[in-house]
């Protein structure tokens, strides 16, 4: 089927498929998301910007990354708290002379590797240093996990903004790029070689 269109007293016939494609394109333009709104929605609720842009396939990636980072923060915070408490308890017991590695309720005893005693760890002073170092390590890991969480959150906002901006960017098969060598003759008939880059719209 062909649809007629009059321009300058001349009838031009446009295929229905072309008109339908133009119609769909105009509808898509009306539905083009606002980039600033997408960012604000994503700032209020992670993933909301992707939903607003109708990029639903990105949601598992967004929430998977955020949940992974959240798990890492919680895990590192828990380990940091355990070693901080054990270090404090062992230090105070050492000062008071009440170190009791036979008591499983002691925080520093619970952190001993299976089959190990404080003596096998190098003595009280060495074990205190070990607990202090591990406390510092887990605090650093926790801080890095927090930074990673913030970075992932920021990336979701950047993605929502860029996705909204490029909503109507043409990525159809009509676009192509062709790179090929070419022999070029200048005005002096000297043969030279060049690289030709052609982008077809």
Image (spheres, helix red, strand yellow):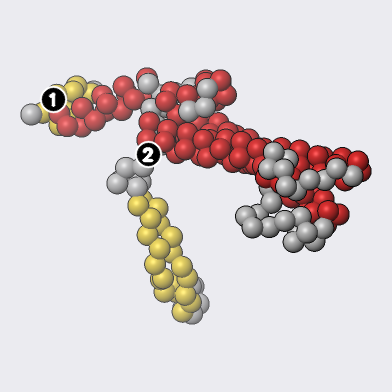
Q: Secondary structure at mark 2?
A: loop
Q: Residues within 10 Å of mark 1 (few under 14, many from 20)?
A: few
User: Which residue extends farthest bottom?
Assistant: 190
User: Which residue extends farthest left?
Assistant: 1
User: Which residue extends farthest front?
Assistant: 102
**Residue 136 sits above or below residue 159 on the image:** below
- Check the picture and name the quadrant holding the N terminus: top left
Q: Secondary structure at mark 1?
A: strand
**Figure quadrant of residue 36:** top right
Report the residue at 20% width, 27% height from top: 20
Report the residue at 76% width, 55% height from top: 118
For this rendering, which residue is in front, 126 or 105? 105
Gap in Å between the C-alphas at discs 1 and 2?
25 Å
Would you say residue 168 is visible in this rendering?
A: no
Residue 56's x, y, as percent? 38, 31
Residue 5's x, y, as percent? 18, 23
* Residue identified by numbered label 2: 170
For this rendering, which residue is in front, 17 or 41? 41
Q: Which mark is residue 3?
A: 1
Report the residue at 47% width, 33% height from top: 63
């Amino acid at each position: 089927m062909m649809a007629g269109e009059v321009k300058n007293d001349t009838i031009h016939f446009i295929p229905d498929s072309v008109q339908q494609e133009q119609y769909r394109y105009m509808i898509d333009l009306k539905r083009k998301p606002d980039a600033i709104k997408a960012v604000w929605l994503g700032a209020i609720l992670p993933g909301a910007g992707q939903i607003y842009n109708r990029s639903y396939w990105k949601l598992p990636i967004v929430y998977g990354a955020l949940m992974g980072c959240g798990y890492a923060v919680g895990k590192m915070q828990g380990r940091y708290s355990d070693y901080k408490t054990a270090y404090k308890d062992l230090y105070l017991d050492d000062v008071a002379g009440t170190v009791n590695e036979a008591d499983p309720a002691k925080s520093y005893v619970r952190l001993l590797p299976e089959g190990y005693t404080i003596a096998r760890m190098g003595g009280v002073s060495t074990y205190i240093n070990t607990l202090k170092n591990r406390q510092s390590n887990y605090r650093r890991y926790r801080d890095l996990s927090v930074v990673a969480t913030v970075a992932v959150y920021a990336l979701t906002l950047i993605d929502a903004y860029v996705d909204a901006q490029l909503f109507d960017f043409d990525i159809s098969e009509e676009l192509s790029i062709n790179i090929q060598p070419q022999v070029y003759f200048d005005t002096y008939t000297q043969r030279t070689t060049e690289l030709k880059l052609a982008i077809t719209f």
